[in-house]
Image: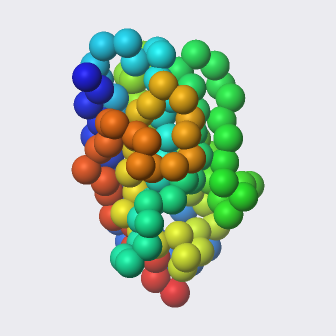
Amino acid sequence: QVHLVESGGGLVQTGGSLRLSCAASGRGLSNYYISWFRQAPGTEREYVGHITWGNEFAEYDPSVQGRFTISKDNDKFTVFLQMNNVKPQDAAIYYCGAALWPYKSATIYKYWGLGTQVTVSS
């Protein structure tokens, strides 16, 4: 069982920055990939990027590559999503999910947090 809690969402201006956090707990966390997804109203939950506990490798969707950075604090079992140069199309509820493989399809994930809302103003 893995428990995830997102935080850090809020209102950000276009071009601004925001840092989201995902606090993870549970057994066997080092075996999981932690992925960020987002979901805007009326759309499917889409993959943003992921990181593994075991190394520093992170991968990103092309829509956020170069603007978003995923990092982690191993001691606190927390994963961060640093959002820079935020665009209006980044507005969504952001979720972190845990899976044994960094699937890019949200339907495969078993463990999710409740999400944190990101609103972008122009």
Tell me which corner region of the image, top left, top right, bottom left or bottom right, holds residue 17: bottom right
Tell me which corner region of the image, top left, top right, bottom left or bottom right, holds residue 96: top left
Give the x, y percent position of residue 42: 38, 78
Residue found at x 56% / y 47%:
104
Give the x, y percent position of residue 41: 37, 76
Query: Is 13 placed above or below 65 here?
Result: below
Q: Is residue 6 left or right of residue 53?
A: left
Labels in figure, total: 0
Tell me which corner region of the image, top left, top right, bottom left or bottom right, holds residue 2: top left
**Pick the front one: 107 or 75:** 107
Give the x, y percent position of residue 110: 34, 37
Residue found at x 25% / y 22%:
1
Q: Is residue 44 left or right of residue 7?
A: right
Residue found at x 52% / y 87%:
122
Q: Is residue 20 left or right of residue 117?
A: right
Query: Is 12 placed above or below 68 here?
Result: below
Q: Is there any visible trace of residue 21 in the rendered image?
A: no
Q: Is there any visible trace of residue 108 in the rendered image?
A: yes
Give the x, y percent position of residue 26: 28, 19
Coloration mode: rainbow
Q: Residue furthest bottom?
A: 122
